[in-house]
Amino acid sequence: MQLLLLGGTTITKKKNDGVTASTASLNLPAGYSVANIFTAKAGNGSYEELGEIVTASKNDYTSYQIQVYTDLKNPSNPVSGTPAYAEPFEYTQALAGIDTIPLPEPVLLAPGSQYSVVITVTGNPVSYYVEKSQDLGWITVSADTSPNQSFYSRNGSSWIDVGKLADPYCFSIKAHTKTVTFVPTVSPTPTVTVTPTATPKPTATPKPTATPKPRTYQVKYVKNTRLSVGSLPSDKTKYTSGRNVKVQKAPYCTSRFFTGWNTRADGKGTRYLPGQTFKIKQNITLYAQWSLSYTASSLIYRVTGRQTVTCYGTSNSRLGKAVIPLTIKYAGVTYKVTSVWSKAFANKKNLSSVVIGHNVSAIGSQAFYNCKNLKAVTIGTGLTRIGSQAFRNVKAKCVITIKSQKLKAVSSKIDQGVKQMTVRVPKAKYSAYNRLLRKKSKSVIIKKF
């Protein structure tokens, strides 16, 4: 049995054992170029328009420069034609595998003409897919690896025809075209002047041609992660060249910070924040950028939900005072600080005072464990739960002020390992909190304010 693969590759199965074959790959260092030459014959004598190409890489975040050459003069040289663009355009393939790349502007191809797609590696080395004939014992893979079809170059000027190698192959580069009805006009050959004949009838005045519509461009937003993302913007506006574009709002992820938009998937291009403007001159793709954590005022935060975060710890091992705010703002997005993570400040021997904002509803287990100099803690109005051993082994006579009237759960003895701890509670909740706290501890001192 034979199966048709990309580029005319065929597989002949020698044994029906359920195993499939795949293309091989070739390592390409930065600066190397690969190219395939095509003949415009899909239009059956009509002009064609090249609108997109297809690449195939085994790596994520593969960066290229891409150029198309038309009307090749030398079938053994993929750059011997006319470049379609004044400069090669840049593109980053975010994910490994096959990627379809729309061209900045479609390229018109004359019927029967030869053209090339040239790709140069600009970032990290790439493992690029190739198609080649192989006999694997249980299966035979046959690929079309004719000469004058596929090439590579170390410098962009001297090209090696890989179809002429002892072990030929073909780079997996595809070109997608469509047939167009446009035929460019040719200046007529001047005719010889002849003796005038009878006065001809006047011809009708030609209708004025319509003013051509200006070229338009669009902006595409890509989430750039395998994680679930919400509120990804979409812009269907068609902008004329030079028009100002306002960057749209931020998407959200329930486990990552949005850090901005970038013209490259790997974040090495131009960065934009929501609300910024830029002048558009070509189609542009903006890739969302993400970060696991964010540090502000030496406090580390991580995302726990839609625009909610936890205070995860501190980057300052000698931190003396900690103020956990109601909210933080990063890359134009505001997040509520709703919890203190387990062991967030454990063993911080210099920590002496803590103020916790009104949006914090939970303090994790051992959050302030063994903070031996912690003597004053003020907790806001949102607290509902205190985790196990959250304040174990803090300083003797530590005073904890709880402003919240929503506290429902205290997982363990609040003054474990602490002598003469005082907990101050709202007057309206004195009786309830006295029962709640003394259920776990008979030694803690409860006072009302």
Image (spheres, grey):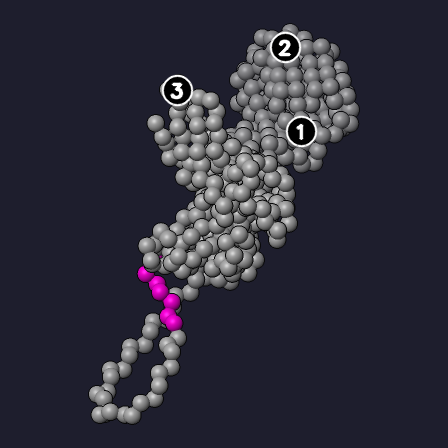
Amino acid carrying mark 2 in the image:
Lys
Dot 2: element: loop
* Nearest-to-viewer mark from 3 and 1: 3
Give the Cα distance between marks 2 and 1.
21 Å
Label 2–label 3 contact, CB within 8 A: no
Q: Amino acid at mark 1?
A: Val
Neighbour tally class for label 2: few under 14, some 14-19, many 20 plus, Cα within 10 Å: many
Secondary structure at badge 1 equals strand
Q: Is residue 200 magenta?
A: no
Residue that label 1 marks: 355
- On the image, the x and y values in percent for residue 290 come to 57, 37
Of mark 3 and mark 1, the one earlier in the sequence is 3
Q: How much space separates mark 2 and mark 3, taking CA atoms? A: 70 Å
Bounds of the magenta span?
180-186
What x and y, as percent, mark residue 183? 35, 65
Please tell me which residue is depicted at 33% across the width and 58% down the height of the picture.
45
**Does any portion of residue 19 appear in the rendered image?**
yes
Q: Are marks 3 and 1 in contact (CB under 8 Å)?
A: no
Residue visible at 49% across and 58% down? 72
Residue 15: image tag: 3
Residue nearest the viewer, comparing 9 with 442: 9
Q: Does 86 appear above or below 11?
A: below
Answer with mark 2 or mark 1, whichever residue precedes in sequence: 1
In the image, 211 versus 400, the foreground residue is: 211
The image quarter containing residue 373 is: top right
Query: Could you say where residue 137 lies in the image, as x and y percent from the top left?
Result: 47, 22
CA separation, marks 3 and 1? 72 Å
Give whichever of discs 2 and 3 has the lower sequence position: 3
Disc on res. 413: 2
Identity of the residue drawn at 38% across and 67% down:
184
Quadrant assignment, res 321 = top right
